[in-house]
Image (spheres, rainbow, N blue to C red):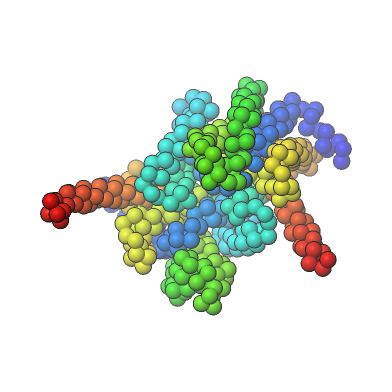
Amino acid sequence: MSRLADAWHTGFFRRAMLEAVIVGLVAGAIGAHVLVRRLSFFVVAMSHATFPGVVIAAALGLGVSVGASAAGLVVVILVVVAGRRSDVAESTVTGVVLAGAFALGVVVQSARAGGARQLTAFLVGSILTVNNTDLVVTIVVGAAALAIVVALHKELVLSAFDRDGARAAGYRPLVLDLVAMVAVLMAMVVAIPAVGTLLAIALLVVPALTARTITDRFVVAMVLGAVLGAVCGGIGLAVSTMWRVAAGASVVLVSGAGFVVALVVRALIDAVRRRAVVQSGELRSPVGSPA
Amino acid sequence: MFDIVLAPLRVAYMRRALAECVLLSMLGGMVGVHVVLRRLAFLTDAVQHAVLPGIAIAFVTGTSLLAGAALGALAAVVALVVLGWAHVDRDAAQAVIIATFVAVAVVIVSRRRGYQADLTALLFGRVLTVRRDELVQTAIVVVVSALVLAVTHKELVLLAFDRPSAIAFGYRVDVLDAVLYALVAASVVAAVRSVGTVLVVAFLVTPAATARVMIDRVGPMFVLAALLGTIASWIGLAVSYDASINHGMRLAAGATVVLLMTLVFVVVVATRSIVGRRRHVLVAAS
């Protein structure tokens, strides 16, 4: 505990805490859209596919977010276009693009001299080295992503649940798909410096899934996901400081633990409710029966 | 040019790497076609990430990587089944498994000092350091998979194209599913050491997806997928060898192979969509 208290007095830790909370909040809210559109595999693909962008950007001396966004946009287009053009399923194309893009990153990385340490930072994040510029980028991009999903809330939800209905209502589902994917991409790019490419998946899926386990209403799930994401980000960072494990990994494990707790509680509540229904049914049926 | 292609055959470790890649390509042809037909790419990806903690533990304790990977795959399958009981959406469950298993692996590995190099070895594999006994293990997986697939071929293909009929015919669909998932897990475990956890999906999905785009018949699809994988492996290894030996440019061997596979897929999809469109135009005109 005292290690945590000591850390709190340092600037880098407070910046890291702020970053973790904001990233968790944005990803948790966007995650509701990921789940309802079944974009989980797309998120996984994105997390791998932004990797070559990050490597190439590092080689050119550009920022991580720039490279990640550029590569991410290419992947969005590839998955959407190739998925419509070819005979194979969209998930298959996603798998191909995922592996190919990651291989490109590895090849570029291997051609440059000595980058194992750098590589690890991309993969698992290095939240404690977040600087003020990173924080500002996180806040601006995160706010923009949230603004997109809030402004287009009705259209996005309609097209996710009822594509044909959305088309009949005069919307273009494909454009809305792209908008949703871009919002996911923005949340992803924001999360990469903090928790790394491999673990950003978790923040976009797990808190939202926990929220879905608790409530069935979309808006409530979105708000709850944001809160859970922020809380998991904060607690995860605290845990990582106390026990000296990688920050990204401990954020993910805290979110995972939260999900398991929610699942178990949900299962118990369901079991109790079912028993109550059965018992009340037994009590009622003799009264209602003519005998 | 010819020399570049033949160069890998002259060095012992390149011969072993090539042999491993050819074996994996055969596996990719057999199991991969089913993965593509059944749309199991995401499952493959989930399993390949799930083997990470097992491998990490084996790495730290110095026990067999194969046993560690098998343990990880088993844990992932159990987690998937449990989440399925809890009515968690399949896609989301797989994403949760990927994230948490990777996180566990990172924690385990990060307890060791100087873990960066270890982590990269886990993720990207070391195809050039494949040993003879590892080749034998991969070959065993190939033979067993071939036998299992030969016995269940008709049922699995029926299941892929027409699940309700398969159920109506009285086949044990859940058992067949389990057989296929086990084969996917075994392939991932076999391939993980040499190409690393992140690129396994390429061997299992990319050549098969390319073959699927090129032809419609299932039998030739197996052969074509294995052939495409083998060719990409050979050229990829040759290119990465030539670049590092003669041009002083280090290209990661496994990743170069995967990159070539992807390139072939992109070219085939592009050609197919142009040719296919022309065919549609001709049909419409006649």
Q: Pick whichever, B217 or A13, lies toward us.
A: B217
Point out the residue furthest to the right here. B2
Asked whether residue A130 appears in the rendered view, the answer is no
Residue B80 in the image: above or below residue B21: below
Q: How far across and how far down the image is residue B143, in percent?
A: 64, 26
Q: How far across and how far down the image is residue B142, in percent?
A: 64, 28
The count of marks equals: 0
B84 on left or right of A198: left
Report the residue at 63% width, 49% height from top.
A96
Q: Pick whichever, B88 or A136, lies toward us.
A: B88
A37 on left or right of B149: left
B6 on left or right of A248: right
Report the residue at 40% width, 63% height from top.
A29
Report the residue at 54% width, 39% height from top.
B169
Q: How far across and how far down the image is residue A254, in percent?
A: 35, 48
Report the residue at 50% width, 35% height from top.
B172
Q: Pick whichever, B55 or A270, lies toward us.
A: A270
Asked whether residue B89 appears in the rendered view, the answer is yes
Q: Pick whichever, A40 or A164, lies toward us.
A: A164
Residue A243 in the image: above or below residue B71: below
Point out the residue furthest to the bottom here. A170
Q: How far across and how far down the image is residue B63, in percent?
A: 49, 24
**Image quadrant where residue A58 sits:** bottom right
Point out the residue furthest to the front here. A291
